[in-house]
Image (tube, rainbow, N blue to C red):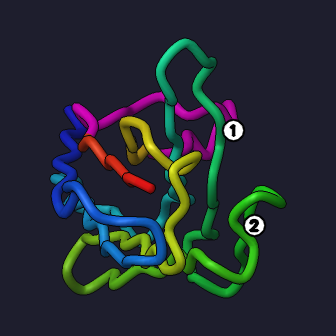
Amino acid sequence: QVQLVESGGGSVQAGGSLKLSCVASVSTFSSYAMAWFRQAPGKERESVARISWSGGSTYYVDSVKGRFTISRDNAKNTVYLQMNSLKPEDTGVYYCAVRSPESLLYVHWGQGTQVTVSS
């Protein structure tokens, strides 16, 4: 059973920074692509950033390009999301997720961490 635990959320003013962490309890962490999703109040969950198993390939939704950076440390079973120049529209619950190499679907999810950006 894969367990994911996010941390690092909080409340910041616009323009501030936060760094989210997600620790995965899986022995083959380095085999999995990972992603960060977010869900804003009243909106559907969206993929914010994705990273390949090696870290060599990343993807960002247009709204966060140039401000967010996804990275991973396979030795620590951890994926990170560095968020800079935060905007009020970045507010939401942020989730990390593991992608199944078989189905290519995100099948394991953390409990989420709240990020609130005030103007």
* The N terminus - image quarter: top left
- Residue sitting at x 58%, y 46%: 89
| Type of amino acid under label 1 | Leu
Q: Report the residue marked by disc 1.
A: 104
Q: Is residue 28 left or right of residue 31?
A: left
The stretch in magenta equals: 98-112
Q: Quadrant of residue 60?
A: bottom right
Q: Quadrant of residue 19?
A: bottom left
User: Relative to 117, is 105 above or below?
Assistant: above
- Residue sitting at x 68%, y 31%: 103
- Residue sitting at x 50%, y 39%: 38
> Would you say residue 26 sits in the magenta stretch?
no
Q: Nearer the viewer, residue 89 or 46?
A: 89
* The C terminus - image quarter: bottom left
Residue at the extreme right? 62
Badge 2 element: strand
| Whole-percent x, y for residue 31 in the image | 48, 65
